[in-house]
Image (cartoon, rainbow, N blue to C red):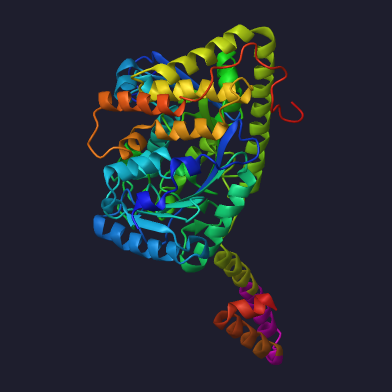
Amino acid sequence: MNLLEFLSPATQAAQRTGPNDRIVMSSRVRLARNLVGFAFPGWAKKAERLRACELLRGAVVRQPEMRDAFTESLEALSALDKQVLVERHLISREHAAKGAGSAIVLSRDERLCVMINEEDHLRMQALLPGCQLKEAWQAIDQLDTGLEKDLEYAFSHTLGYLTACPTNLGTGIRVSAMLHLPALVLDEQVTQIIQAVNKLGLAVRGLYGEGTEALGNVFQVSNQMTLGESETEIVERLSKVVAQIIEHEENARARLLEKRPKMVFNHIGRAYGILANAHSVSSKEAINLLSLLRLGVDLGVLPDVRRSLVDELFILSQPAHLQLRHTEKLSAEDRDVLRADMLRAALRDVRRPLTPPPAPPLDKPPGA
Amino acid sequence: MLCMICQKKEARVHLTDVKGGKVKKVDLCEECAKAKGVDDPTGFALADLLLGLGAGEELASASPEGAELACPVCGLTQADFKKAGRLGCPTCYEAFAEGLANVLKTMHKGTRHIGKVPRGLKLGREVQERIQALQRSLEEAIAVENYEEAARLRDAIKQLKENPGAVVAG
């Protein structure tokens, strides 16, 4: 089966729901593991990389969680396939740049994905919708425990799991939550929040991870330190911080509605106006405007729109997903036009935002 | 104040990074700052710089003059590590242990692993400790010429080495 037949369509992918998903778009836990007796992928010669890849892939696909999984060598995937995987947050951009000697294994439910020979021999992740950091850790812990029966990991009792980069040493864990924080951005509080989070030794990154900008008011919060703290402590610490950020975002939404409603509805109304009527929209503009539309849905001013529709458009607006819908190779200009066509069609039957907006907001979460 | 890298020119670029309550300062001259890419904020991460710097200095002081420290298994040298910021193989952690110790201190919460241990190794460690304890008893038994006990201990060690799972489980 090829990748595009295997992957669930964007409509379906956008239907996945989880706790607090109006702010927490997804939760991810990834583990870095390496084999004893092999050089790390970045330093190994090609023959050694191929040997390690074969061994690892065999062990991963044998795990019960990987029944009916999709697996492919990176050289056998097209550039488009790889970009689609990046846009679905299933592989890193670094992994997408790899070829022979690297591979991917993706579970049938798309919750577990293993990158083979990325920076480390194994980079395995559990990706769940909404705020489910603990569940994601349990899922990936289980896969890892299964794998350690078949593979001899490079492990030291003092330093823990040995990784190519010392920044991942120890637990090899990276716990991250993808947060949609439009009100904190509109209220110009987000820089303060980021600084506070940084002070706790946590990193804040953009939509596609390391070194990317915060498109669409989406921020990834993750742990940075991996040595000297257990996995459960890290998961708990991050969960607490995420809960606080959720509270700040909810408070910012309530405060903005009370103090500066015109500013908020101006942004949402303009976003709707452009998305529903424009004839050329770049992916960056689309993602930024869809973020405001999503806020409009959360605030109850767009009763015709479900959040899953916005999330679907979020996926479909990205370059590779847009290219998928067309057989001919698209230029960036073509894509902007076709993206606008797609967005207009999707919003054709959506009535414009309500004025005056209903108060209080429809699905205000308990405790906010 | 002199530049931390070349130790010759006056430091004019001063960087401060606060992480987990730890403050780390770097003072560089303009040329070294440029060479490290510090003048270009987009392509610069203080952690990487610190990693390269700290590790380089530590490793340099740990190796005999002239000879560059290299990993005996994979051949990675400190220069390779400085360049890529990545180690070559698991053994590199032993080869560069001295230099890495300080790097890890600035980078992480602690310097000892707390958390998951692969099951095989957990068992391995318990069995090793058990065997060592039995061996000490065996030596004591021989010393007091208690050969009956010594024979029993000898068999227990033999059994533990051949089938480590059974004894620990039982």
- In the displayed image of the protein, which residue is found farthest to the front? A349
- In the displayed image of the protein, which residue is found farthest to the bottom? B148
* Residue A188 visible, this angle: no
Question: Is A265 in front, or is A152?
Answer: A265
Where in the figure is residue B170, as x and y percent of width and height? 70, 79
In the rendered view, does A281 fall on the left or right side of A110? left
Q: Is residue A274 magenta?
A: no
Magenta span of residues? B131-148
Q: Is residue B31 above or below residue B46?
A: above
Q: Is residue A185 above or below residue B151?
A: above
Where in the figure is residue A287, as x and y percent of width and height? 44, 25
* Residue A58 visible, this angle: yes
Where in the figure is residue B20, as x and y percent of width and height? 59, 30
Q: Is residue A319 above or below residue A110?
A: above
Where in the figure is residue B130, as x and y percent of width and height? 65, 73
Q: Is the N terminus of chain B in the top left, top right, bottom left or bottom right quadrant?
A: top left
Q: Residue at coordinates 66% horizontally, 13% vertically from top-left?
A: A257
The quadrant where residue B122 appears: bottom right
Q: Residue at coordinates 39% horizontally, 23% vertically from top-left?
A: A284
Question: Is A346 in front, or is A297?
Answer: A346
Q: Residue at coordinates 49% horizontally, 12% vertically from top-left?
A: A270
In the rendered view, does B149 fall on the left or right side of A231? right
In the rendered view, does A198 fall on the left or right side of A360? left
- In the displayed image of the protein, which residue is found farthest to the right? A367
